[in-house]
Amino acid sequence: MGKIIIAYYNCMVHIISPHIDDAIFSLGGLIHRLTDRHKEIFITYVFTISEWVNEEAPGAADVKDRSLISLLRAQEEENVSALFRYRFEFLNYREHPIRNADSDQNMVSFLRSDFNKKVASGNVCFFPLGIDHPDHIILGNLGAELFSKGHRIFFYEDLPYAAKRSEENLKLFASLENRKLKPESIPFDIDKKIDAMKLYRSQLSPHWEKIITNYAYDPKSKTFSERFWKPSNESIIRLDN
């Protein structure tokens, strides 16, 4: 694969993920490449109380009791983290739409306080850009706040939502460089990422797998890559594979 990004090998990479699976859907290639080189990855999953399954996913038929979905998804995450060798935590907030929207303001205040502490260490912290889904938008806005205060915040493209060629997405990507962010793409092993994604049996449908795979593919180079957005003043260390 030639050269890859091994960014900040002297510090931890912290990823903020709205739901169980978002980090791997969006950054699974980077996560695998870094942990394969013994880089420390820690993922914070925020909205982990869930009653949702993807009805087109192969594991959807196994769900007989929706009250057990959170436990099922937690087990799926255990399986993925064992495969890719990273640590994680659940914050156990209810996902949209099963929480009371009237409580969102207090919830955001708690998250803001928590994230301020998490980023204070100087570790690189990835947030979602905040596309489409209300939970993603909440975290994208909090990441933007922290970035504006000078913290080392990187942003990943929320998949599968980022793959939509909507007017809103096109405007968002066009605006990022004005926010002092620059794109960085890394090649990755698509088979390794798919192996991990398929462990989310209650979530990944064949349709989503196709969307995520096609979004990563560059027909000119015939390679797969993931794109994220880094602060313009940040350098990236590149090492030979």
Image: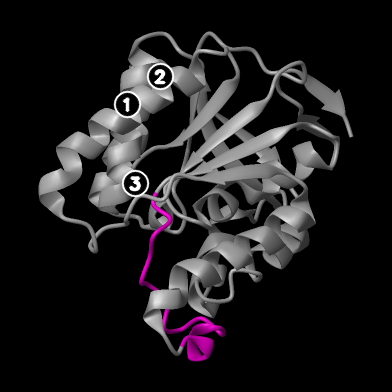
User: What's the residue at 75%, 18% (across, down)?
Assistant: 237
Tell me: 29 left or right of 38: left
Q: For this rendering, which residue is in front, 218 or 149? A: 149
Q: Which of the 4 quarters of the picture holds residue 213?
A: bottom right
State which quarter of the image contains the C terminus.
top right
- Residue 9 position, x and y percent, is 77, 20
Rendered position, 110 above or below 28: above
The answer to whether residue 176 of the structure is visible from this angle is no
Which element is circle 1 on?
helix
Q: Label 3: which residue?
A: 136
Q: Label 2: which residue?
A: 116
Asked whether the residues under the numbered discs 3 and 1 touch, taking CB atoms below 8 Å apart as contact, a structural biologist would say no
Is label 3 or label 2 in front? 2
Label 3 to label 2: alpha-carbon separation:
18 Å
Q: Which comes before the other along the chain, label 3 or label 2?
A: 2
Point out the stretch of residues depicted in magenta.
Answer: 47-63
Is label 3 or label 1 in front? 1
User: What's the residue at 61%, 66% (across, down)?
Assistant: 75
Which element is circle 3 on?
helix
